[in-house]
Amino acid sequence: MYWKTPLQATFLLPFLYSTVTAQVACNNSPQLCNRPYSNITHLGAHNSPFLRDESTSFSTSGNQYFDTITQLEAGVRLLTAQVHKLNNTEGNQAWHLCHSSCDLLDAGTLQDWLSKIKTWMDSNPNDVVTLVLVNSDDATPQDLGPLFQLSGIDKYAYTPTSSPPSNGVWPTLNALIQANKRLITFVASITPSPQFPYLLDEFSFVFENNFENESPTDFSCTPNRPSGLGTPEQALATGRMFLMNHFLYQAQIFGIQTPDEENVNVTNAQSGRGALGTQLRNCATQQGGRPPTFVIVDFFNVGPAVASVDAVNGVQGSVVGRRTLTDKVVMGSTSGVEGSVVKGKGSLVAVVVAVVVLVGLGV
Ligand SMILES: *[C@@H]1O[C@H](CO)[C@@H](O)[C@H](O)[C@H]1NC(C)=O
Ligand SMILES: *[C@@H]1O[C@H](CO)[C@@H](O)[C@H](O)[C@H]1NC(C)=O
Ligand SMILES: *[C@@H]1O[C@H](CO)[C@@H](O)[C@H](O)[C@H]1NC(C)=O
């Protein structure tokens, strides 16, 4: 389209301006901008960097089909990972993202992952991202903080003014965006340091339900970690936010558990027994009508999980700037027979390695 005369273009400017203003979205919806960070539901990718794709020969340990950046593009705003200490080939120690053990699935260094997220945040200035890092080898703030600095992501890191906010109310998304402090980092667990104050001890701010479930009937809204919080309402009264674990494990031979791909179309569905949508509503009911602040799922594209989150946020119809992915299970590669062979090989390797790990532990 072009304008016939400058006059016509000038005449239209105010309308163009107001259209643009109206479409400014925070975490994909204009309706979320003025709501407190603590009063929306953030969709989380459980074990975000641990993939079941070509890069891992379709490892059965993988929790997601799409990588971290694709997750963010598709609406995920919380990323979890496990941080492990690894001795590299040069004999130096490095902090890696590994699934249970670095022999089982090593997704590279924490610093590289943070750099990728930082680059995405650079080009998405209206988005607030949350990290939940499982501190598997007791890293200190002095171990992790420098990696946040080297990646450059520390410039976005937010530090709350108290721990937890006494009434449990956090700044609005808009306030975090205007301050350009758009990264919230929880570590499970860590002793806070004034040198890196944005590395927050998760369980001082957050409570979770049980995460080890193998059946849709196992899902519960009862606070499980930290211990001693009582009922969901009592836990909320401490000022902590609720993180709902909503994924299933499948029992394999030798007591090994793998992410349950077989039932994920039900687990991540909007309705039905043990479905994501159902559990979000159940837990809201048990918490005085307040839905969970965070929910983490495996294979987030299936469902799609984001549809249930949009529903509890009440933003259906106002969502913008999101990439759409398949909402189905992604079996092996798209190349048919070859894909299923690759998948089989990946599964076998994962089981063999897991057995070696168990034997090594004397289990
Ligand atoms: C959360 O936001 C919803 C929707 O704007 C609002 O109805 C509700 O009162 C808010 N709750 C709290 C605790 O801020
Ligand atoms: C890494 O190296 C340290 C020091 O050499 C050693 O104590 C530790 O056991 C090693 N860890 C692993 C997982 O190999
Ligand atoms: C889940 O997938 C199974 C097997 O493909 C199918 O029978 C079932 O109807 C699906 N359920 C939902 C809720 O999509």
Image: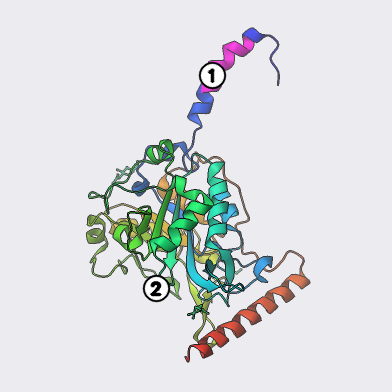
Can residue 301 be seen in the rendering of this structure? Answer: no
Residue name at image x 45 percent, y 75 percent: 215
Image quadrant holding the N terminus, namely top right
| Residue 101 horizontal side relative to residue 168, left or right | right
Residue name at image x 47 percent, y 61 percent: 80
Q: Which residue is mark 1?
A: 15
Is 12 within the magenta?
yes
In the image, 136 versus 44, the foreground residue is: 136
Is 288 within the magenta?
no
Q: Which residue is mark 2?
A: 218
Magenta stretch, residue numbers: 8-17
| Residue 327 horizontal side relative to residue 182, left or right | right
Q: Residues within 10 Å of mark 1 (few under 14, many from 20)?
A: few
Can residue 181 be seen in the rendering of this structure? Answer: yes
Residue 328 percent location from the top left of the image:
61, 61
Eye-nearest disc, 2 or 1: 1
In the image, 303 versus 127, the foreground residue is: 127
Q: Residues within 10 Å of mark 2 (few under 14, many from 20)?
A: few
